[in-house]
Amino acid sequence: ILTEKIDMKILYVTHYDSNNIKLLSGTIYHVRRMLEEQGHEIIVLDNIKIPIIYYKAMKALSKVTKKKTLVERSPFFLKYIARQIERRTVGMDYDLVFSPSSLYYAYYKDKKPMVFYTDATFGGMLNYYFSEKSCYSWAVKNAMNQERLALKNADLAIYASQWAVDTAVKFHQADEKKCVVVNRGANIKHKLSKEEIYSLIDQREAFIERKKCTFMFLGTDWKRKGGPFAVEITKILNEKFGVESKITIIGCNPQISQEDMKYVDIIGYLDKSQKSEYEKLENTFKKANFFLLPSRSEAQGISYTEACSWGVPVIASNTGGVSGIVKDGVNGFLMSEKSTAQEYAERIYDTIITPDEYRTLSKATFEYCISNLTWSEVGKKINKELYK
């Protein structure tokens, strides 16, 4: 993008509040901080006002008809955003435009290089996260077109996984030469040293040696994140393998049958901005033997990186962009989408009966995180792409 290696002035564009760490799992905030930590001067253009009357009208239509209008991907909405960006950048001095979304580039153009960094395309999410039948046909057509225009206008498209790149090419005719893959980093930071993490791993190993196992599930969408499947795996380990297992659920309050409640501990939603609730989240990571999140559909899953930062091996399904973070046998198990709960349980059991293998996997998980899954390492990778 830039041939001369300089500390750039980067225009960071988002219609969200980039200081709000709660938004989108903290990604908007952390991407901005990542750029700052690489030594760039960040000129923030956020909190872009939206056409509220149009927005409310489309939301009302959606509520009445039970069909998605995809208002934030409509031509009207995006042209409005583009005009606001143009108006607010008059007289500004910057070297590059960077956004955590492709959306703004559908109608906004700049003489300076335009880069975006995201984890999915609309085409990739359609009939994966949500059904095409749940949307107005004109809304889907518009959304597909806006993504295509944004990719055409962007100088560099950074995606969090190869899956996302493939969907950009397949559904939106992206120029593959403009697309690169850089996984995302962990949005939860702790202050423990390597030695302290290893000490926690040793304590967990002792638990494993007694043929006990604690799983951790973190997610707000119980079904999409594979919650019922995770409970089934835990149940099989108890009833068929004789492993005293329990799964701790954070982020939601699902309906669990009375029969299965003995395998489940529900904590519910935790607000990371509240000290006591954040400490409860940290304590769950500290005690977990495995992070079990066998999502049925997943653009990437930032929580996988957060588990790795605690040296907690991840057990996930190889769907969507998960493979951008989870490497089978390196920082956990990446199971086939077709794997049964029995097959998951067998793989977990094989590790539990070999405590040394568990310890090795846990330490490798932490090491892999330090080398690949921190925002600092992500920033270095992105910097290399910006200066090519």
Image (cartoon, rainbow, N blue to C red):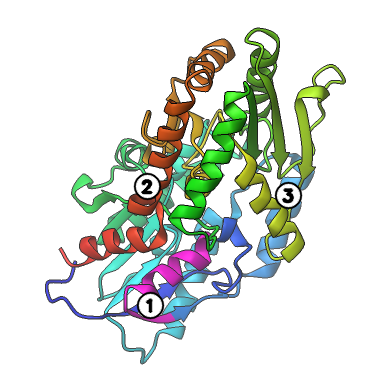
User: On the image, numbered disc 3 is attached to which residue?
Assistant: 61
Mark 1 against mark 3, which lies toward the viewer?
A: 1
User: On the image, numbered disc 2 is attached to which residue?
Assistant: 367
Give the overall secondary structure of the magenta segment.
Answer: helix
In the image shown, does 170 or 6 lie closer to the viewer? 6
What SS does tag 1 mark?
strand
In the image shown, does 338 or 10 lie closer to the viewer? 338
Looking at the rendered structure, the kind of residue marked 2 is Glu
Toward the left, the furthest residue is 3
Locate the N terminus by quadrant.
bottom left
- Residue at the image point whose x is 40% and y is 68% from the top: 34
Marks 1 and 3, the one that precedes in the sequence: 1
Residue 273 percent coordinates (x, y): 69, 65
Toward the right, the furthest residue is 258
What SS does tag 2 mark?
helix
Locate the C terminus by quadrant.
bottom left
Q: How many marks?
A: 3
In magenta segment, residue 41: yes
Q: Is residue 336 left or right of residue 17?
A: left
Residue 15 percent coordinates (x, y): 54, 69
Give the residues in magenta.
27-43
In magenta segment, residue 176: no
- Residue at the image point whose x is 67% and y is 62% from the top: 55
Kindly identify which numbered label has been placed on residue 11.
1
Q: Residue 41 falls in which quadrant of the image?
A: bottom left
**Distance from Cα at disc 3 to Cα at disc 2:** 50 Å
What SS does tag 3 mark?
helix
